[in-house]
Amino acid sequence: MKNNTFIYLLTVLFLNACNQSESIPDPRPKAQIQFLHKVADLASEMKMVGNEIVVDDRLDSCRKAISRYVKDTLNNKFDNWVLRVEDINNRPMGFDVVELTLLTHVDFNLDSKYPQSDSNVFKSYIHYDKKSAIDSLKNIVKGDLVKVSGTFDLKNKLLELAVNSTSYSETALFENPKFSFTLKSISKSKK
């Protein structure tokens, strides 16, 4: 009887050990996670609009809500947010800038099949006269996890926000948003 109990316990322990997958700890700061949840909450709010007549009003109130959050809670800036490099485009359309595209997910999904379509996108244009910022991009490649600090871009006191999708819908503005920002610093993140 003792033998059967012992074998049963060993089997249970072995199966538990086999079922445990190695998880990557989430390195993102609390402010970043809270911001992403705020955006997700607004996306849910937009999805719940059942009357097409009020969509524009709800969209306007959601834009104002995220803008207030960025201004009041984040002081219009973010420090050491962990993002993934999606693209570094040198001199897009011949301009003397580098276009930097970074991605982040609410659930820190590192293996998304369609990263641009299920992410919050952060986009910045860095002018060549910002030599230290340009130099900091030289050792960074697509796919790198980076720590980024910067300020959100505002236009008429509202957060500069666009849809990062080819098909525009009012809900997509918060389901797959693109935020413009001004880069302060960027460095590779230790995983």
Image (cartoon, rainbow, N blue to C red):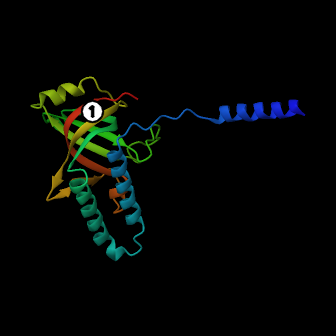
Residue 127 found in image quarter: top left
Find residue 117 and report its horizontal and vertical position in percent: 40, 47
Residue that appears at 39% across and 71% down: 49
Find residue 19 and report its horizontal and vertical position in percent: 65, 36
Q: Is residue 161 above or below residue 82?
A: below
- Residue at the extreme front of the image, as rendered: 2
User: Is residue 165 visible to the viewer in this orientation of the structure?
Assistant: no
Find residue 67 and report its horizontal and vertical position in percent: 23, 58
Which residue lies under the disc numbered 1?
A: 88
Left/right placement of residue 10 relative to residue 187 reads right
Find residue 104 and report its horizontal and vertical position in percent: 36, 43
16, 87: nearer the viewer: 16
Q: Quadrant of the N terminus?
A: top right
Q: Quadrant of the C terminus?
A: top left
Kind of residue at badge 1:
Ile
Dot 1, crowdedness within 10 Å: few (<14), some or many (≥20)?
many
Residue that appears at 23% across and 28% down: 137
108, 50: nearer the viewer: 108
- Residue at the extreme right of the image, as rendered: 1
Residue 168 found in image quarter: bottom left
Left/right placement of residue 108 relative to residue 96 reads right
Q: Is residue 148 above or below residue 174?
A: above
Q: Is residue 172 above or below residue 84?
A: below
Residue that appears at 18% across and 25% down: 135
Circle 1: element type:
strand
155, 7: nearer the viewer: 7
User: Is residue 185 visible to the viewer in this orientation of the structure?
Assistant: yes
Left/right placement of residue 98 relative to residue 19 reads left
